[in-house]
Image (spheres, helix red, strand yellow):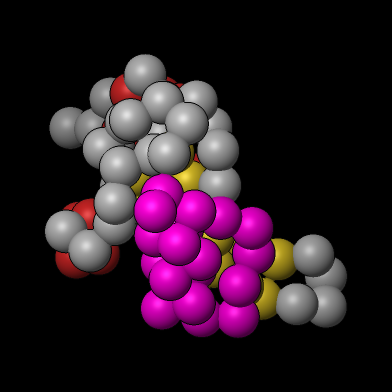
Amino acid sequence: MKDTLDIIREHEGFPTTASKDTLLPCPFCGNKNLGIAETWNGNYHGKVVNCNYLDGGCGANSGSRTSEAEAIEAWNRRAE
């Protein structure tokens, strides 16, 4: 049975296990609990990498990108 934290994580897009291995830690807080969420503003579907604030992260994100690969690339570029 899912607990409340699991339900919130799913809703917020945390974590995406398949891509966690390719993401560098958060450049702001060092958190490794990252997720990829889907974004929607009414006209545009995108993907965003998030530093999981539910697991001690700071909530930083990559900004919305057109694909998961672009969001990961933007996130990893910030961490360099």
Q: From the viewer's side, name the closer residue of 9 and 18.
A: 18
Q: Main secondary structure of the magenta part?
A: helix
Q: Quadrant of the N terminus?
A: top left
Q: Relative to residue 2, is residue 59 drawn left or right? A: right
Residue 36 occupies quadrant: bottom left
Asked whether 25 falls inside the magenta stretch, the response is: no
Asked whether 78 falls inside the magenta stretch, the response is: yes
Residue drawn 56% across the image and 55% down it: 62
Residue drawn 61% across the image and 72% down it: 65
Q: Relative to residue 62, is residue 52 drawn left or right? A: left
Q: From the viewer's side, name the closer residue of 46 and 30.
A: 30
Q: Position of residue 27 (x, y in %)?
A: 43, 39
Q: Position of residue 18 (x, y in %)?
A: 19, 65
Establish if 7 lies above or below 14: above
What is the magenta range? 62-80
Establish if 16 lies above or below 59: below
Q: Position of residue 45 (x, y in %)?
A: 66, 76
Q: Relative to residue 51, is residue 65 drawn left or right? A: right
Q: From the viewer's side, name the closer residue of 56 and 25.
A: 25
Q: Can I make out residue 49 in this image?
A: no
Q: Position of residue 71 (x, y in %)?
A: 49, 68
Residue drawn 75% across the image and 77% down it: 44
Q: Can I make out residue 2 in this image?
A: yes
In this rendering, the count of numbered labels is 0
Establish if 58 lies above or below 40: above
Q: Relative to residue 1, is residue 74 drawn left or right? A: right
Farthest residue toward the right?
A: 42
Residue 33 occupies quadrant: top left
Residue drawn 45% across the image and 62% down it: 77
